[in-house]
Amino acid sequence: DAGTANERGELEYQCLSWGPSEVVLHTEATGLGGRPLASIATKRCAADAVFGPEDNQLPQAVAGALASACPGPAPEGSGVAPVLCESGAVAVMYGQTGSGKTHTAKRIQRDLAEELFRRPGVAAVRLAYWELQAGGAVDLLNGRHEVRLRDRAGRITAEARAEVVTSSEELLALVDRGVEHRSLRETQVHDQSSRSHALCLFEALSAADAGVPVFRVVVLDLAGAERGVETHQHDRDALAETRFINSSLSVLQTCVRCLRVGKRVPYRDSKLTMILRDVLEGTSRVVWVSHLSPMASSAQHTRQTMQFVRSLREVARDVPGKRPPVRWNRSEVQHWVKGLEDGKYAHLARWMEWADGATIKHEWRGGFVP
């Protein structure tokens, strides 16, 4: 076997196999000091669904799941586009650079543009599209003008331009316009590598109450991490982009680990994790689309992504109402406070809007037993 062509057309061997709900990584086994053992080591990772590179059903399946997950009304909107909300649905593209995240995000966005107008009662769709990069945030629908991000009690709102359209054709054109303004750069891994985290917000509007969203759907395309060996040809600007991307993704991984073990979650260490807070706390419907490259040269990235997926699945198993109080999100803490002694302490709830279970335990240095 001569191998398979990678993103740059170079021949490589594959190290990945998969089934309907599992991915298996095959690498050379090593002993102490990295000494090869002349055998194959395997690592397995379960998933709700696995799609191969030739499977065209992924974007349509994700778009359908997002649209069907939003039956109820969202909080009232305004001229400022909220990033994420507790009654929305979110698709997050995650994985190494060059693994196809942006390609998948584009296809999901296009399928959503058609799917939303098939939903009963949807008369128009409002779209905001912006990206978070090393120098701040820019609006992809408004000539890459700066987007002001505001911190509202630990959550981010974005003052991005939002445009309203009344047909899927207009919405597709608007999505394509935003895609054309993405930050891209040639790297050693890919000739068109995304250099930012891009957020595309769809708000479905009803004919009965124009301007008030029926529901919100977000497609978040995260930039991929890069190893040091993949950056030695970067100039100063590219290195700054890489530092921003790697740092924000590192904080995201830390937040997921803290959620898994019940420690205080450092959301404020990165704007990305402040944006993703509702996603990580389980107050939004979420589809994580993790991308893996099957090439042997990407085995280290693949192993790290698989570990991240395992951590996500452990966090997802903590169903609200059944997990320990230290893992409660802010909504669950508010519900608990308001219910103490038949509402005796409900007046204190507004003073504790900032607190989740891990924060209360950290601040009180106690056991936090409701």
Image: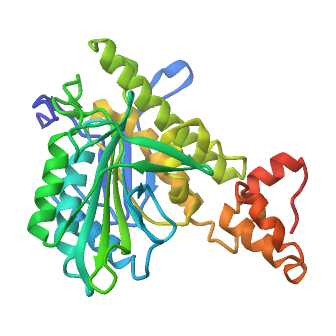
- For the point 19% across and 48% down, the residue is 178
- Depth check, front residue: 141 or 62: 141
Residue beneath the point at 41% across and 31% down: 245
Q: Is residue 107 visible?
A: yes
From this viewpoint, is residue 329 visible? no
Quadrant for the C terminus in the image: bottom right
In the image, residue 75 sits, relative to residue 121, either above or below, namely: above
Q: In this view, does 207 lie to the left or right of 306?
A: left
Q: Which of 95 and 340 is in front in this view?
A: 340
Whole-percent x, y for residue 123 in the image: 22, 80
User: Residue 328 at x, y = what percent?
Assistant: 70, 63
Q: Residue at x 38, y 59 (%)?
A: 79
Query: Which quadrant would the N terminus be assigned to in this image?
Result: top left
Q: Which residue is drawn at 70% across and 73% down?
A: 322
Residue 362 image point, x, y percent: 81, 46
Against 91, is 97 above or below? above
Quarter of the image where one finds residue 287: bottom left
Numbered disc total:
0
* Residue 26 screen position, x and y as percent: 36, 42
* Front residue of 1 and 280: 280
